[in-house]
């Protein structure tokens, strides 16, 4: 775990918090008050007291998802505990964005919020021995009161299978988050493959409610993909954010990567093992 995730876990343990947190009660315990305000520029903001350890969390009024609202509160609590001098508004572009070019403090607050709302040990118990699917992700989101995006990322953190969650907008991959055993690369900036469920989602088509096999090249960037390699995919349109959430699962080997011995073969010459050899492998 990262340091910010460990702090979230320690907070849960110290206060003996249940799996699904009452965030209003937690805020009161931390001397924070939550207010909803009309705003078009930020989703959440932290205001600190100049005299004592206390403050206010301002929330944009009218969140479409309760899970998103809860994540925003947890994100601001993260700033409150992690970043002593920080008090500034957080726009929708930085909360639960997960892009690599995010400011470090925002990524740390997101990581804190993820562990606070989705405690790893409890999520492992929720996943149990179920196969990867958006149904499992939906169950996690409902149980812990989070967005599908946050639940999908946490699922991939604990899943034993080789899978990854992918977020796309305007038919373009924005980021992906792999499980520990997912060894392939999904390139941010690429367009989703036209044979994928995600492509159909952006076309406005109805999607199946289960995993289906699609060409691996629709997702995986690799020069070693096997001919006719496939991966399992399940996608869901997210119209609120004009995006698509996809779960990609590599059930069987899809690449033929060269071994160290294969990489040496091109360097061998007919006279490779004689005194006249002109070039030796490094």
Image: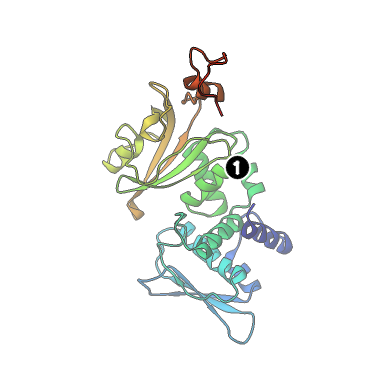
Residue situated furthest front in the rendering: 276
Q: Is residue 152 above or below residue 226?
A: below
Label 1, residues with CA under 10 Å away: few <14, some 14-19, many ≥20: some
**Residue 130: image location, x then y, percent:** 57, 34
Residue situated furthest left in the rendering: 203
Q: Quadrant of residue 282?
A: top right
Q: Which residue corresponds to mark 1?
A: 158
178 or 257, nearer to the observer: 257
**Residue 111: image location, x then y, percent:** 56, 57
How many numbered marks are there? 1
Q: Is residue 136 visible?
A: yes
**Residue 115: image location, x then y, percent:** 60, 55
Q: Is residue 126 left or right of residue 59?
A: right
Residue shown at the point (57%, 15%) measured from the top left: 275
Q: Is residue 67 above or below residue 228?
A: below
Residue shown at the point (42%, 22%) measured from the top left: 226
């Amino acid at each position: 775990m990262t340091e910010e995730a460990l702090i979230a876990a320690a907070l849960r343990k110290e206060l003996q918090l249940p799996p699904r947190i009452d965030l209003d009660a937690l805020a009161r315990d931390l001397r924070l008050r939550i207010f909803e305000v009309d705003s078009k520029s930020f989703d959440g903001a932290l205001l600190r007291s100049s005299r004592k350890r206390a403050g206010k969390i301002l929330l944009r009024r009218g969140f479409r998802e309760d899970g998103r609202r809860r994540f925003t509160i947890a994100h601001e609590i993260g700033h409150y505990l992690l970043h002593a001098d920080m008090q500034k508004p957080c726009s929708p572009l930085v909360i639960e964005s997960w892009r690599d070019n995010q400011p470090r403090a925002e990524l740390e607050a997101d990581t804190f919020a993820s562990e606070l709302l989705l405690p790893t040990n409890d999520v492992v118990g929720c996943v149990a021995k179920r196969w990867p699917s958006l149904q499992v992700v939906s169950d996690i989101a409902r149980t812990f009161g989070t967005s599908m995006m946050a639940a999908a990322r946490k699922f991939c953190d604990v899943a034993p299978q080789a899978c990854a969650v992918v977020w796309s907008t305007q038919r373009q991959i924005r980021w992906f988050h792999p499980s520990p055993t997912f060894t392939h690369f999904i390139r941010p900036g690429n367009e989703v493959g036209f044979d994928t469920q995600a492509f159909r989602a952006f076309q406005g088509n109805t999607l199946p409610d289960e995993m289906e096999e699609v060409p691996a090249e629709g997702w995986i960037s690799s020069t070693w993909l096997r001919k006719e390699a496939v991966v399992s995919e399940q996608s869901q349109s997210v119209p609120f954010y004009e995006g698509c959430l996809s779960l990609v699962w590599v059930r069987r080997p899809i690449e033929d990567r060269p071994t160290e011995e294969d990489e040496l073969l091109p360097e061998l010459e007919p006279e490779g093992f004689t005194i006249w050899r002109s070039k030796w492998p490094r």
